[in-house]
Amino acid sequence: MLPGRLAPHLCKFVARVSSTGAAGSMDGGHVIAYKDMKALVASGKAHIVDVRLPEEVANGRIANSVNVPVAEVEEALKMDPKTFKMKYGVDKPQMGDENLIFHCQMGRRGAQATEIALALGYAKARNYAGGYKEWSEKEGK
């Protein structure tokens, strides 16, 4: 059973995904590739949310990312902007932000966080499916 007001939104999202034929997975419109991710990181124009645990982030992170563990994503996105900024040290993403990107180590938790964001109305949220694993391999870190 899903908590609170998220359940109806998630049901709509699941219905939308199912109707696209992408049963159980996000369609290509909500995933970002390494090349595009690299350009966004370089531009500084992205809200990059690392949904790994703090101890994972301590071993390395993507520049300008903010750590919001996947278990906190729903609560964080429901916070008022002032509380979000106090807790995470960055401005809260806006509903219409073009470049709200979630990532984890290898893609699964990032996809989960992206689905939560989509269900809450962040229609342009995307998952960097390669995760920190791909990033660190390609960046030589």
Image: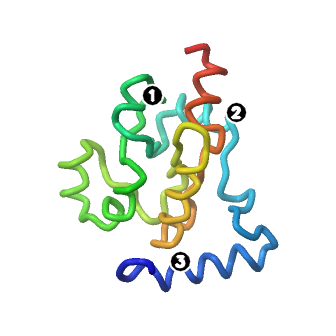
* Residue at the spot 65% in from the left edge and 57% down from the top edge: 30
> Which disc number belongs to residue 35?
2
**SS of the residue under disc 1:** loop
Quadrant location of residue 71?
bottom left
- Quick check: 127 above or below 77? above
**SS of the residue under disc 2:** helix
- Badge 1 is on which residue? 61
- Quick check: 74 above or below 41? below
Q: What is the C-alpha distance between the residues marked 3 and 1?
A: 29 Å
Query: How many residues crowd mark 3 within 10 Å: few (<14), some (14–19), many (20+)?
Result: some
Contact (Cβ within 8 Å) of mark 2 with mark 1: no
Q: Which comes sooner in the sequence, label 3 or label 1?
A: 3
Left or right: 29, with 100 as reference point: right
Which residue in the rendered view is the most extreme toward the right? 21
Residue 54 in picture, x, y percent from top left: 34, 36
Q: Quadrant of the N terminus?
A: bottom left
Quadrant location of residue 5?
bottom left
> Which disc number belongs to residue 84?
none
- Quick check: 89 above or below 70? above
